[in-house]
Image (spheres, rainbow, N blue to C red):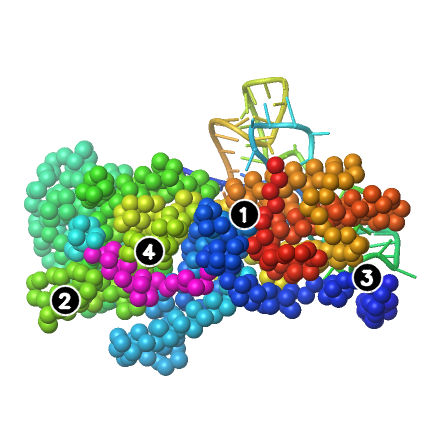
Amino acid sequence: MLLFFVINSKKCYISYMDEPNINPKFLKPYDPKETEDRIYKIWEESGFFNPDVCIEKGATDVNSPTFSMVLPPPNVTGTLHIGHASMLTIEDIMVRFARMQGKRTLWLPGTDHAAIATQSKVEKILEKEEGKRKTDLGREEFLNRVNTFAKSSHDTIVSQMKKMGTSVDWSREAFTLDDKRNLAVRTAFKKMYEDGLIYRGHRIVNWDPKGQTVISDDEIVYKEEKTKFYYLKYGPFIIGTARPETKFGDKYVVMHPEDKRYLEYKDGQKIELEWINGPITATIIKDESIDMEFGTGVMTITPWHSVVDFEIAERHKLDKEQIIDKYGKLLPIAGEFAGMKIKDAREKIIAKLESKGLVEKIEDYTHNIATAERTEATIEPQVMNQWFIDVNKPIKDQDNKTLKELMLGVVKNGEIKIIPDRFERVYYNWIENLRDWCISRQIWYGHRIPVWYKGDEIYCNIEAPKEDGWAQDEDTLDTWFSSGLWTFSTLGWPDLNAPDLKTYHPTDVLETGYDILFFWVARMILMSTYLLDEIPFKNVYMHGLVRDAQGRKMSKSLGNAMDPLELSEKYGADAVRMSLIIGTGPGNDSRMSEDKIRAYKNYANKLWNITRFILSNTDDVKIDADFKNYTEKDVALIKERDSLIKEITKEMEEFKFYLVGEKIYAYTWARFADIIIEESKKIFTEGRDEEKLSRKQFLLNTIGDIIKILHPFMPFVTEEIWSMFPTTDKKLLMVEKWPVRE
RNA sequence: GCGCGGUUAGCUCAGUUGGUAGAGCGCGUCAUUGACGUUGACGAUGUCACAGGUUCGAAUCCUGUAUCGCGCACCA
C-alpha cells in the first residue's frame, strides 16, 4: 500500500516498500525526458535502423519483401519546424510498421543543399554581421562560408530528427551536393545533353533583379497589386497598358484577325505615328492570341520583357529589343529616361505622353504581379542565354515519347498512385501547362554546370577536358535538378549494379507536402522514367500544412511558430507525434495546439499505469500466447480485440494512420482501461481461480498487442514499457512482429 | 477565367459501399485512501451551410446557390 501526504493539495509518495515485485520505475509517472534519449541510443546501437543489420541479426529474413522510402531531404537553411516533425512522424509510422511486419525496410535520410535558399540565407547573415557582399569575398571564400553554415545546419537537423524518434538508416545518409550526388548530376546532365534534351538558347526567362539570377516558374509568387491602367494614343489606335515604361521599343501593334473594328488594317501593313520620343514606323500584326474583349482589343508588344509578347514575336519572326537592363534600369533606347529605375520612370513618361496629348484616359486597375519567392523582388522577364530542358522533344530510346508524356503516362496508367487522388488531376493540369524548364542559375552555391567553353567550342562531359584553355560555365543548376535524382542517386546510381539500387528501387512511398508536388514529385518522375526507365516510387502520400490553433500559417513574423523540440521537451516526443497524426488526413491542412499535445502526454502516462496495474497483478503467471483455457467472457473480449486489430492492420496498409491512432487510443482508454480493467478488479478479488488465470492471460496478451500497435506512433514509451515486460526471449520492440489476426 | 477542397456540438475534426448523428478538447454536476487527479462516473449542446432532386430512407449520391480557403492561368 502506498503512503502519501498532502502538500499544496498534491500527493507525494514517501514509501513504496510493500509494492509487489515490480520495476520501481513504475512507481512514478512516466518521464519522457529521462527515457527518450536513452531509448534512441539503444535503437541506434542495435543497428536495426539498417536493414542489413536486421538480416545479419536475424530480425528480418533476407527474402522478405522490401519496403523503401527516401526522406525528403530538409534544406540546410536552419532548423526543423513543426511541419518537418509532422512529416517525420508520418514517415516513421510507415517505416516502423513495415519493419514490424518483417519487411526488409530501408528509410534513407539526407539533407538538401537548397542552392538559392541557402545562398541567400548566408548572404543575409554576411550583410548583417559583417556588412559585406558575396563579391567582397569572392566565389571560393563565399562558398567556404556557405559550406560551414550548411554543416552546422545539418548537425542541428540530425539531432532534431533523433529527438523525434526518426528510425532512418544513418549509415546511408546522403547530401544533395556531396561527391556521389555530384557524379549523378553530371552523369544525368551529360546524357540529357547528348539526347538533345538539354539545350542552351536565348529564351525568355524569369529574371530576379534583386537576386541577380534566373528562377523557374514554380519559384514565382503572384501578388495582387493596385495600379493604374493607361489608355494611350498609338497612331490610329488606342492601346491599353499598365507598364508604359516598357513601351519605348514597341513597333508592332497586334490585333485579332477577326476583330471587325480593325478589318481595314492588314497584317504586315506599316503605319507612321508619333510616339514617346518622336515619330516611329509601326507594323500591324494579326494574331489569334489577342483577347478582343480586353481593353480596346489592340496592344503593342514588348517581346524582350513579356512571355506572351515573346511568343507572338516568335510566331511572326519579329525583332526583339531589350528595354530594361538586369538591374531594372532603362537602357539607352529610352532616350532621356535612360538609366532611370523603371518605377521612377513611369510617372515621368506618362507626364511626357500627356504633354504630347497621347494619353486618352487613366483607370484604376488591379492585377497580379510576379515576384520572386526568395527575394520578393518583382520579376522582370528577360531574354537571356540559358540552359533548358526540352519537355516536348521526342526521345528515341523512349518510343519517341517526350518528357511530358513520360511524366503523364506513369500516373495515368496507375503505376504511380497519388494519395489523395484529387492531386492526380492537379498534376495533369500542371503538366499540360508545362514549358521548357530553365535549369541554369546565376548563383554560386550548387552543382556547377558540366560544360566547358573555348572560343566557339562547347564541351559537355562528366569530367573536365584534359587540355588547357577551357573555361567551365559559371552557372550552377536549379536545386531541383539534383533533387529529381534523389530516389536513385541515394541508392548508388549511376552504378547500375549497385546492390541498393537493385534491391530498393523503385521505392514504395514518397511522402511529402502537396506544396512541392510540382517542384519535386514531378521532377523525380521525369528524371527516373527518363534515366532509369523506371518509376521512382509506387505511391505518393501528400500531407498538408500544419497550422496554428486558429488555422493560421505558422511563421516567425506572426510569432505563432511552434518549435517541435521545445514541445517534445515539455510533453515528450511521443505526445507531439501523436498530436500531429490524429485528426490529420492526407492532403488536408491540420491544426496544432498545446491542449492537443497535453492530451497525448496524459495518454502516455495512462499506458504506463495500465501496464503497472497489469504487471503488478499478474506476477504469478507467465505470458502465454497460446493459452487455451479462456473463459467464455474473455473469449468474447478476444474476439472484439482481434477484429479491431484486423481492422487496424488494414487501415495501416491504406495509410489511414489518423484513424488507427484514434481507434487504438479509444480502445485502450475507454474500453480496455475503463471497462475491462475495472471489471478485472472484481474478478481478481472474488473470481474463481480459472477466471483469474484467464483474465490475467487476456490482460497480458492484450497490453502486448496494444504496445505493439502503438509502437509506430509512440515509439519511446512503448519501447520503454516493453523493456519491462517479463517475457523471455525478448527482442527490441522495434523489431517485434506486428500482431496478425485472421 | 479554369480547377480543387472545406462548410457536422462552444473549439478542432471523424463519419469510404445511403440505414435512427460521433470523438477529443472545453463546459456543468458529483466522486475520490482505488493502477492512474496526467483520474473516474454522469450530463448539456447539432433543421450535418442553403435550396431542389433520386430513394422506403440522404451528413453521405445528383443538380444548383452561398460562403471560406487553396492551386493554376492571366489581361496587354
What is the distance, in whole Å, between disc 1 and disc 3 at their CAs? 35 Å
* Residue on which disc 3 sits: A20
- The answer to which of A264 and A591 lies nearer the viewer is A591
The residue shown at (35%, 73%) is: A147
Whichever of labels 3 and 2 marks the residue nearer the N terminus, that label is 3
- Residue designated by label 4: A498
**Image location (x, y in percent) of residue A419:** 46, 43
How many numbered markers are drawn? 4
Q: Quick check: do tags 1 and 2 share a chain?
A: yes
Residue A465, numbered circle: 2
Say if residue A477 shows up in the picture.
Answer: no
Residue receiving disc 1: A101
Quarter of the image with the C terminus of chain A in it: top right
Which quadrant of the figure has residue A350? bottom left
Mark nearer the N terminus (1 vs 3): 3
Asked which secondary structure carries label 1, the reply is: loop
- Marks 3,2: beta carbons within 8 A: no
Percent position (x, y) of residue A599? Answer: 67, 56
Q: Nearer the viewer, mark 1 or mark 2?
A: 1
